Image: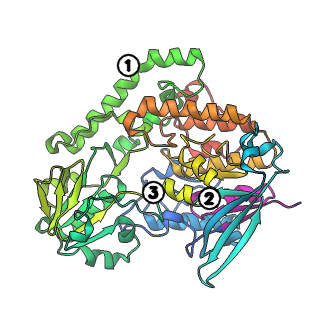
Amino acid sequence: MERQVAIIGAGISGLAACRYCKAKGLNPIVFESESSVGGVWRKTIRTTKLQTPKHFYQFSDFPWPASVTEDFPAQSQVFEYLQSYASHFDLLRHIRFRSQVVSIRYDGPPDAEMQAWSLWGGTNDHSNTKGKWHVTVKDQQALLTEVYQVSFVILCFGKFSNLPNIPEFPNDKGPEVFHGKVIHSAEYASMDHTAAANLIRDKKVAVVGFQKSALDIAMECSSVNGPEHPCTVVYRTKHWGIPYFLPFGIPLLYPYLNRFSELMVHKPGESLALSLLVSILTPLRWGISKYIERYMTSKFGLAKFDMVPEHSFLKEINSCSIAILPEDFYNRVEKGGIKLKMSQAFCFSEKGILFDDEVESEDVDMVILATGFKYFEKLKDIFVSPTFQSHIANASGLYRNCLHPRVPQLAVIGFSESISNLHTSEMSCRWLAELLDGTFSLPSIKEMEDDVKEWDKYMKKYCGSYSTKWCIGGLKIWYNDQLCKDMGWISKRKGGFFAELFEPYSPLDYIRP
């Protein structure tokens, strides 16, 4: 009997999921709410570039074309690359565009029976499942709603879209009292580039946030208005930003892209011998982090702007908080085109925004909230079942960053972050396709939950208060090793002892099992 798999989203994760499910003879159907593939790369801020050098941000069996010579391709080039991938592997015929998934409902055994299961889905035979998913889809063109019954669901709608995170404010101190305009960065990014430039022209703009979108918008405001109408960047935490250029032709993240770097970090489920080795190498780990911190402090003049973060660069990597710093950013700060304001809280007044104790204020004409997205709410709310909603809301992570042990016949791809989100998603999709094809079986639910707890301990140890759920930034190779072992692949993929330790791992190392 043919098994149909519903894939929600046609960004990088959805395309990879479709490609590998198709390769295993499954019948994938992809629901995409927009009119094209690409996810967040379909439409971005005009100046947005890839944050990862392209060598590390590519599909293992589909390298970048020779015509793309930049180390950090622009949005249009990434979008074209994803379109080419979809065409090359004949994925478009599986995708239903402008089809918004409203909800998913599991039709299976009662909650009490599922809670008593010792194995995921009640069985290790994933071709003989105990339930079905009902996927309710709204056709945005025909304005019709249809329900599809499938044996498996893969959620690939990602963390950076659809449900903007708008801060909450006390009564009479929110956007409603402000006489200017307040928008979220998602609204700004969706605009035509000319319209976006006209929107901010001759206005004093405040951008709230200090991640990629906030920095790019601040740069665009500075380019349009200059020092005459400076852009104020309001942030709570100072972050280490890495440059677009490659110092000495080598990525600044190079020390964190090889297996040796991960020998200096305690890992979930490591042996006693590995744990002792980590302890011996701790001073070296500290030294590498300090070297990179000093380089960036000197290169960007961070001390002059009081922008040296209190936390280490290693913590930034492990928490997936690292962002590419736009070229010339601190030069714009020095010349007055961008102003920096650290504030733990803010609210609105008629003329602008008030900081912390509300004594200091900034008069502005517009506020752009680059405050991220409520991705866990988006993930939770797609389930009809309150039980599944609770499982997702309270999850400290996912098994292999893909599966919730208590939610059967469903995977989440694209919520795990790393130095290369594309590669992480592709590896997860390959692992999932092998699982669905019966190549290997999962351990018990208890063993999976114990594994999730070990990863949670690792995150808390190395990230502390900066910990974000489902980040494998500091252990990307170790994570891939676990997937390879499950699938029966060789985990060490370099030729020779020193190459294995010190050469950076890239997607092309995983082109074959």
Task: Find residue 197 and report its horizontal and vertical position in percent.
Answer: 28, 75
Q: CA distance from mark 2 to mark 1?
A: 46 Å
Q: Are marks 3 and 1 in contact (CB under 8 Å)?
A: no
Q: Is residue 187 above or below residue 458?
A: below
Left or right, 264 with reference to 388 = left
Residue visible at 63% across and 50% down? Answer: 387
Q: Earlier in the sequence, mark 3 or mark 1?
A: 1
Instruction: Give the amino acid at mark 2.
Output: Phe
Residue with the most extreme right position: 1
Specify the amino acid type for callout 3: Lys
Of helix, strand and loop, which one carries label 3?
loop
**Label 2: few (<14), some or many (≥20) within 10 Å?**
some
Q: Toward which corner of the image does residue 91 lie, by quadrant?
A: bottom right
Residue 383 tag number: 2
Judge by depth and name the residue closer to the eye, 362 or 377: 377
Helix, strand or loop at mark 1 = helix
- Estimate how packed mark 3 is, as few (under 14), some (14 to 19) or many (20 or more) residues with alpha carbons within 10 Å: some
Amino acid at circle 1: Pro
For the record, the magenta segment spans: 2-30
Query: Residue at (23%, 39%) from the top-left corner?
Result: 308
Q: Which residue is mark 3?
A: 374
Residue annotated with mark 1: 283
Question: In the image, residue 508 lies at what x, y percent?
Answer: 60, 46
Quarter of the image for residue 222 reads: bottom left
Position of the C terminus, as image quadrant, is top right
Residue at 27% x, 36% y: name it. 295
Distance in Å between CA atoms under marks 3 and 1: 38 Å
Question: Residue 23's spot in the image, x, y percent?
Answer: 76, 57
Of circles 2 and 1, the one toward us is: 2
The tag earlier along the polypeptide, 3 or 2, is 3
